[in-house]
């Protein structure tokens, strides 16, 4: 059973905090209050800062409040703190795996693995693409799939 999920992107100011906000709202609505949900970045440039302003604005238009979130850097300790680590793209997945301790088997997956009907496999970084709505669309799709995964009875 999954009790804790960590979403990871590059700077923890666009994609991963948005995924945290979206998934928090979905899990609250599904009454999954036991879930621990967090986000982090593989880089430390934005540690302590709130999510990027334009990302917050786009998220707020869809009912997600990201204003209380603050960026932090992913670390080795996260492998033991979380049951599932979700990377926004292949580059961040590789950076996460480079930090994996030898004796830890915490699963690390791409977020869009939970949106199998979506042809994209990575969530493009809206900090660079400026397409905040596309990022939100993808995050909402993958969050719905992840919620279905988390709530499905295990065989």
Image (tube, rainbow, N blue to C red):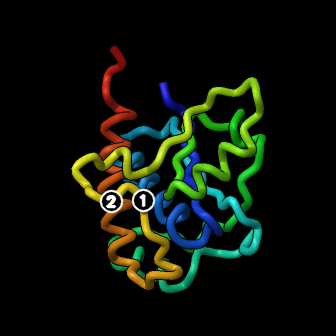
In the image: residue 137, left or right of residue 82: left
**Mark 2, secondary structure of its residue:** loop
Mark 1 to mark 2 CA distance (whole Å): 6 Å
In the rendered image, which residue does mark 1 sit on? 122
Image location (x, y in percent) of residue 54: 48, 85
Q: Residue at x 53, y 72 (%)?
A: 14
| Disc assigned to residue 41 | none
Q: Nearer the viewer, residue 107 or 146?
A: 107
Image location (x, y in percent) of residue 2: 50, 30
In the image: residue 87, left or right of residue 45: left
Q: Can residue 48 be seen in this view?
A: no
Q: In which quarter of the image is residue 137?
A: bottom left
Q: Which residue lies furthest to the top in this view?
A: 155
Vertical position of residue 73 compared to residue 75: above or below: below
Q: Residue at x 57, y 80 (%)?
A: 52
Q: In which quarter of the image is residue 8?
A: bottom right
Total marks placed: 2
Q: Say which quadrant the C terminus sits in.
A: top left
In the rendered image, which residue does mark 2 sit on? 120
Q: Is residue 81 visible?
A: yes
Q: Nearer the viewer, residue 24 or 96?
A: 96
**Mark 1, secondary structure of its residue:** loop
In the image: residue 60, left or right of residue 37: left
* Badge 1 vs badge 2, beta-carbon distance below 8 Å: yes
Q: Which residue is drawn at 47% across and 77% down?
A: 126
Q: Residue at x 66, y 48 (%)?
A: 96
In the image: residue 79, left or right of residue 150: right
Q: Nearer the viewer, residue 61 or 126?
A: 126
């Amino acid at each position: 059973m999954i009790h804790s999920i960590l979403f990871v992107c590059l700077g923890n100011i666009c994609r991963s905090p948005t995924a945290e906000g979206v998934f928090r709202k979905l899990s609250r609505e599904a009454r999954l209050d036991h879930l621990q949900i967090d986000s982090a970045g593989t880089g430390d440039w934005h540690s302590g800062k709130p999510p990027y302003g334009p990302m917050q604005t786009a998220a707020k238009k869809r009912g997600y409040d990201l204003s209380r979130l603050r960026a932090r850097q992913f670390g080795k300790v996260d492998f033991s703190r979380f049951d599932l680590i979700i990377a926004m793209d292949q580059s961040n997945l590789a950076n996460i795996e480079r930090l994996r301790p030898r004796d830890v088997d915490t699963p690390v997956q791409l977020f869009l693995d939970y949106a199998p009907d979506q042809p994209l496999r990575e969530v493009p970084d809206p900090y660079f693409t400026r397409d905040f709505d596309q990022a939100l669309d993808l995050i909402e799709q993958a969050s719905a799939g992840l919620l279905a995964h988390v709530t499905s009875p295990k065989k």
